[in-house]
Amino acid sequence: MLKTIKYLIGTAGPSGYGSKSTAEQVTDNSVDLQSCTAIITGATSGIGAETARVLAKRGARLVLPARNLKVAAKIKDQILSEFLDAKITVMHLDLSSLKSVRRFVSEFEDLNLPLNLLINNAGKFSYDYGITEDGIETTFATNYLGHFLLTKLLLKKMISTAKTTGVQGRIVNVTSGIHTWFSGDLIRSLGQITRDKRHYDATRAYAISKLANVLHTKELACRLQMMEANVTVNCVHPGIVRTRLTRDREGFITDLVFFLTSKFLKTIPQAAATTCYVATHPNLRNVSGKYFADCNEASNSEIGCNRKEAARLWSFSEIMISTDFKPVFAPPTMA
């Protein structure tokens, strides 16, 4: 009860910020971002768009990957109308396609830009069952696997940028508190919903993908530490906010649900605060592998803290991005 009251009134935590803090407020004390280049996925609406706007205000050069280039161009124009000197590049990326991820990274490398920040923000809540061209369940592919490959392919650039500039690189994975709703064998459950439409449940699929974000953060942090790389990775829960995440199912029922939970909803500037705090605040130098909510370190689920599960998911992810994935979850054949 006390925790809920603190959330509702926005009581500040140890960081000095809380649930009512905005992205602009938490970046007031950020280091100068004039020499910083940031890639932000999912920046065409909601939390991602606000994150991009605030980082542009602080001087960062932005690279905005998007499936819909027209929408991304509108976001770019909106930011430029507010900050005339903002440096923004729009590029095509479909995170549900591994081929598209590889193409984006190749095109980004051709720009010969440094890379200081990678904010894996894009997310999808798919009410309808779907399989990607790579044979992967759509929610998992978009929310997790595309970001896993994107991060893997950009890591060399981030490490070299940090080494050259002496400025620590930061990776931020945007997850959700819904990851705590899943318990069980993640890979087995993913196989079930991939092989058989009858096993598909939208909320379960979303929870699996968001748990994968948490486990990815944990394992990547360990690997970066072993590499002695000057790059950190953390994950964030932005809070409850109405964004285009629910775009597949707009209507009366959705409106009713959000009305009933309105007291717990954050504004978009508040929801973007934790991402911006973790991406920029000087107090988080050398902090890695942690889970943040309301701009403060928080605890996640038991499975989200399991190093063995994190390593197991990493190994399976490597298989998914490096081979013909379809046979991995193919239905068993009768002898």
Image (spheres, rainbow, N blue to C red):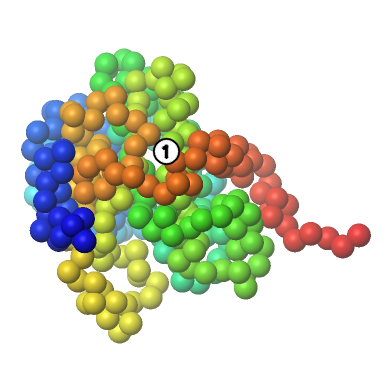
Position above or below: 202 against 304: below
Q: In front: 164, or 200?
A: 200
> At which x and y percent is residue 121?
34, 49
Position above or below: 123 against 231: below
> Which amino acid type is marked by label 1?
Thr
Question: Extreme bottom residue here?
Answer: 252
Question: Extreme right residue here?
Answer: 335
Position above or below: 252 against 189: below
Picture residue at 29% right of the left edge, 24% below the top: 286
Q: In front: 297, or 316?
A: 297
Picture residue at 31% right of the left edge, 65% below the top: 244
Tell me, yes or no, if residue 107 can be seen here: no
Q: Quadrant of the C terminus?
A: bottom right
Picture residue at 23% right of the left edge, 30% below the top: 284
Picture residue at 31% right of the left edge, 50% below the top: 237
Tell me, yes or no, if residue 240 can be seen here: yes
- Name the residue that disc number 1 marks: 217
Position above or below: 137 against 274: below
- Quadrant hosting residue 163: top left
Q: Could you say whether the residue bearing mark 1 is in a helix, strand or loop?
A: helix
